[in-house]
Amino acid sequence: MRTPSGRLCDYYYEDFHRGRNVQECRIPKGERSVPWQPEYCTKCPIPDILRANASPNLELTLTIRSIWLGFGRKMLVEAWCRKHDIPISDPYVGCKICNDERPGLALFAQALEDPEDNDD
């Protein structure tokens, strides 16, 4: 669904039909996260992560923290691989073990490295 900032996000939900006024972010939140507000969608990294990594084993958790006397918000994303049960350091790239298991990805990387071999 399209967020208030105009980007597509799988975790955002809104319903304004027949007088309803529902806007919510359905991504799991960290236990010390402050309550979500619609204006946080402008700086949220989740839509960019979902666009870069479409792994079905990716599990994301968002923690929203206030910074410096509550005058700003910081978005912290934690990523986890459900298949291998390990944390992911860079959610944009995904799980390194899952990426190694995909043979097409290695062929694609090899084709990018050796462009002279592909001249037919």
Image (cartoon, rainbow, N blue to C red):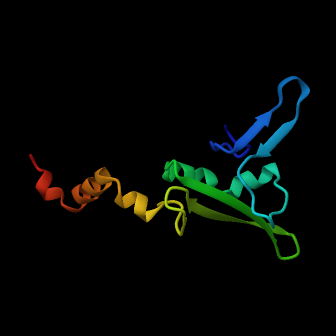
Residue 87: x and y in percent read 56, 67
Find the residue positioned furthest to the top. 18
Q: Nearer the viewer, residue 58 or 63?
A: 58
Residue 1 in view (yes/no): yes
Q: Where residue 34 sits in the image (x, y, percent)?
A: 84, 62
Q: Quadrant of residue 44?
A: bottom right
Residue 22, relative to residue 81: is it above or below? above
Residue drawn at the location 79% of the way across and 52% of the way down: 39
79 vs 14, nearest the viewer: 79
In x, y percent, where is residue 11? 68, 45
Q: Is residue 105 above or below residue 32?
A: above
- Quadrant (top left, top right, bottom left, bottom right) of the C terminus: top left
Does the image show residue 45?
no
Residue occupying image coordinates x 81% and y 67%: 32
Write down the quadrant of residue 16 in the picture.
Answer: top right
Q: Residue at x 84, y 37 (%)?
A: 22
